[in-house]
Image (cartoon, rainbow, N blue to C red):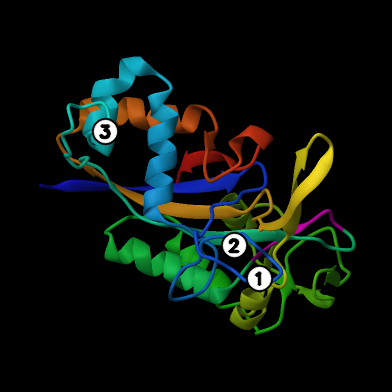
């Protein structure tokens, strides 16, 4: 079967918790999913696919579309078990917001993230018109944190680790901002790994109350809103009549991903890159 590759960005509009499902005996009880190679936060394909299936299941008139894209539901399809025709790949982290002294937040990324992004596009045969611009931006990397705010001549402090981002210059910042978000900062791979590790990601306390009495207090790790990911999707070439409604629907309104939908976690905007 021949497939067409599609590339999407995913921006968390609210804090997101896509749980790893692993037991943790440290301070943080519920950890997020991480890439097994880089250790960066990620959304595994099964979680991404499951969230999108749930999104489409709200409309019962979409049963044929859901079955074609995502596969049968053994609980409702006469106990059959057939796979879907679409192929979902992990949502990899592009950038993450961190607090700053002079701006509300900065969107950090690093050379390894950019190189992996470009490498994935090459391997999956996806044409991205601004690949050369990203490589040019990589060439400005000095190993120090660098910001590119034209109206700020000062160094910016990254509060969470108390280090400075120096002023840099790059002409095609509109391309960078479109992909990585406002106030982009290029940090070293080492800094990025630190800023996204368990010690620096937000952990929110949760509490179960019974008749107003605390019965269980736990801590849940989240990715902050405005975190950005990208993911690749394979759609069969002959699925045009299915792909158009799928593509339109996931971009028309937020898709909820991960746990705690009832308290507003994980609502995300998806856009084709």
* Residue at the spot 64% in from the left edge and 69% down from the top edge: 196
- Mark 1 or mark 3, which is nearer to you? 3
Q: Secondary structure at mark 2?
A: loop
Q: Position of residue 209 (x, y in %)?
A: 77, 40
Q: Position of residue 251 (x, y in %)?
A: 47, 32
Q: Does the stretch in magenta take in 58?
A: no
- Mark 1 / mark 3, whichever is N-terminal: 3
Q: Badge 1: how crowded within 10 Å, few (<14), some, or many (20+)?
A: some
Residue of label 3: 73
Q: Quadrant of residue 194?
A: bottom right
* Residue at the spot 59% in from the left edge and 72% down from the top edge: 110
- Mark 1 / mark 2, whichever is N-terminal: 2
Q: CA distance from mark 1 to mark 3?
A: 36 Å
Q: Position of residue 230 (x, y in %)?
A: 47, 54
Q: Quadrant of residue 159?
A: bottom right
Question: Residue 31 shows which numbered tag?
Answer: 2
Q: Considering only vertical position in the picture, is 34 above or below 86?
A: below
- Left/right placement of residue 50 relative to residue 42 reads left
Residue of label 1: 198
Magenta segment boundaries in residue numbering? 103-108
Q: Considering only vertical position in the picture, is 163 above or below 212?
A: below
* Residue at the spot 69% in from the left edge and 53% down from the top edge: 224
**Furthest residue in direction top, as rendered:** 61
- Mark 1 or mark 2, which is nearer to you? 2
Q: Secondary structure at mark 3?
A: loop
- Left/right placement of residue 260 relative to residue 63 reads right
Q: Are marks 2 and 3 in contact (CB under 8 Å)?
A: no
- Mark 2 / mark 3, whichever is N-terminal: 2
Q: Secondary structure at mark 1?
A: loop
Foreground pick, 10 / 141: 10
Question: Residue 6 shows which numbered tag?
Answer: none
Q: Are marks 1 and 2 in contact (CB under 8 Å)?
A: yes
């Amino acid at each position: 079967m021949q497939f067409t590759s599609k590339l999407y960005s995913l921006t968390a509009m609210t804090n997101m918790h896509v749980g790893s499902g692993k037991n943790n005996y440290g301070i943080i009880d519920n950890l997020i999913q991480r890439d097994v190679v880089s250790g960066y936060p990620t959304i595994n394909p099964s979680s991404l696919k499951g969230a999108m299936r749930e999104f489409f299941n709200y409309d019962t008139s979409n049963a044929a579309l859901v079955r074609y894209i995502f596969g049968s539901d053994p609980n409702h399809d006469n106990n059959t078990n057939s796979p879907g025709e679409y192929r979902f790949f992990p949502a990899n982290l592009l950038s993450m917001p961190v607090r700053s002294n002079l701006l509300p937040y900065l969107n950090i990324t690093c050379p390894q993230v950019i190189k992996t992004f470009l490498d994935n596009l090459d391997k999956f045969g996806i044409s991205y018109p601004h690949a050369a611009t990203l490589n040019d931006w990589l060439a400005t990397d000095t190993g120090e944190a660098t910001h590119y705010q034209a109206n700020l001549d000062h160094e910016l402090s990254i509060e969470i680790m108390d280090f400075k981002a120096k002023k840099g210059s790059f002409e095609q910042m509109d391309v960078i901002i479109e992909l990585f978000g406002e106030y982009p900062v290029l940090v070293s791979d080492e800094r990025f790994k630190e800023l996204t590790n368990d010690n620096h990601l937000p952990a929110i306390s949760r509490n179960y109350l019974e008749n107003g009495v605390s019965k269980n207090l736990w801590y849940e790790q989240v990715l902050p809103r405005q975190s950005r990911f990208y993911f690749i999707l394979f759609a069969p070439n002959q699925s045009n009549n299915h792909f158009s409604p799928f593509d339109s629907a996931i971009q028309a309104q937020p898709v909820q991903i991960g746990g705690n939908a009832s308290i507003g976690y994980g609502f995300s905007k998806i856009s084709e890159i």
